[in-house]
Image (cartoon, helix red, strand yellow):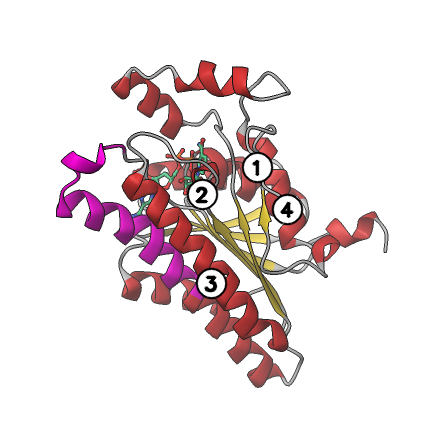
Amino acid sequence: MSLKAYDLTGRTAFLTGAASGIGRASALLLAEAGATVHCADRDAQGLHETAALVKESGGTAHVHPLDVSDRAQVDEAVAAAAQASGGRLDIMAAIAGIMHSSPVLETTDEDLDRVLNVNFKGVLYSCQAAARTMLEAATTTGTSPRGSIITMASGAVDTGGPGLLCYGAAKAAVVQLTKTLATEVGPHGIRVNAVAPGWIRTPMTHRHDAEAQTHTEGFMARRSPLGRVGEPDDVAHAVLHLASDASAFTTGQILRPNGGVAMPW
Ligand code: NAP
């Protein structure tokens, strides 16, 4: 092993949520490591901005405007990405998500459905499309299956907190999906891991703090032994690690770039 384990030259990566924040930073970093990145998001303008940034730094990017909560759109985009790479898909990073906060007693069916549809079903559809494509690619090319699937959980899976019912339930379901799928596709050479970031400074958290007037950013910075909140690059490096051969013996795990805010046993 050497630093070459982080080299993604010749690999194809599909990232959801790639128009903004953590998804954009991850797309840029995977592209810098050599992967061809397929960037998916519902924000078409943001997607084109990400693709332009990738191209500016010498990488290759394709865009797929889509809604991750629509299974058919996800299947179609993943199939198109694989077809553009000779049937190959090496990396899926299911990052798209939305923030939601409401007290348990005020939570409606609509709140639950909206958050679960994006933050859980959107990740499930992305994982299913990726795993099927990775398995099919191996059958078609006669090679051993391989691949890395990365899901985006949250520090919410480690700590309770007011208003976190819908968001935390969806992220807990993502962790369960990650572990279950890891056991099912591991024997075929496919790894599945989750990233559970702490508070990261992105458009999502900026909007949340502004709308809810919670000042959570300052609170989270004070709770971290490092005395700060995270930046998108802090999470992108975790995504790169899990995407690359540097994590070849890691599956079914939760990687926590959270500044030490939570330290589970
Ligand atoms: P962000 O800047 O808002 O980026 C999320 C992207 O996902 C946005 O471009 C968003 O589009 C897109 N998206 C939302 N719903 C979608 C859908 N149905 N279909 C396709 N794209 C959709 O947020 P972020 O902070 O980078 O968060 C990325 C992921 O990390 C999320 O899963 C989030 O839960 C997780 N996370 C974030 C933090 C944090 O502190 N930032 C901490 C833990 C976990 P719109 O702008 O149109 O919504």
Circle 2 Cα neighbour tier, 10 Å, few/some/many (<14 / 14–19 / ≥20): many
Magenta stretch in the rendered image: 101-127
Q: In percent of the image, x 39 and y 55: which residue is there?
A: 123
Is residue 6 in the magenta section? no
Q: In percent of the image, x 44 and y 61: which residue is there?
A: 177
Query: Which disc is residue 81 wearing?
Result: 3
Q: CA distance from mark 2 to mark 1?
A: 16 Å
Residue 46 visible in the snapshot: yes
Q: CA distance from mark 1 to mark 3?
A: 24 Å
Specify the farthest residue to the front: 265
Q: Is 240 displayed left or right of 42 in the figure?
A: right
Q: Is 160 displayed left or right of 241 in the figure?
A: left
The prevailing secondary structure element of the residues shown in magenta is: helix
Is residue 252 depicted above or below 118 in this figure?
below
Residue 88 visible in the snapshot: no
Percent position of residue 81, x then y:
47, 63
Label 2 CB sits under 8 Å from any ligand 1 atom: no
| Residue carrying label 1 | 235
Q: Amino acid at mark 2?
A: Val
Q: In percent of the image, x 34 and y 37: which residue is there?
A: 45
Is residue 9 depicted above or below 45 in this figure?
below
Q: Amino acid at mark 4?
A: Leu
N-term-proximal mark, 2 vs 4: 2
Q: Amino acid at mark 3?
A: Ala
| Residue carrying label 4 | 240
N-term-proximal mark, 4 vs 1: 1
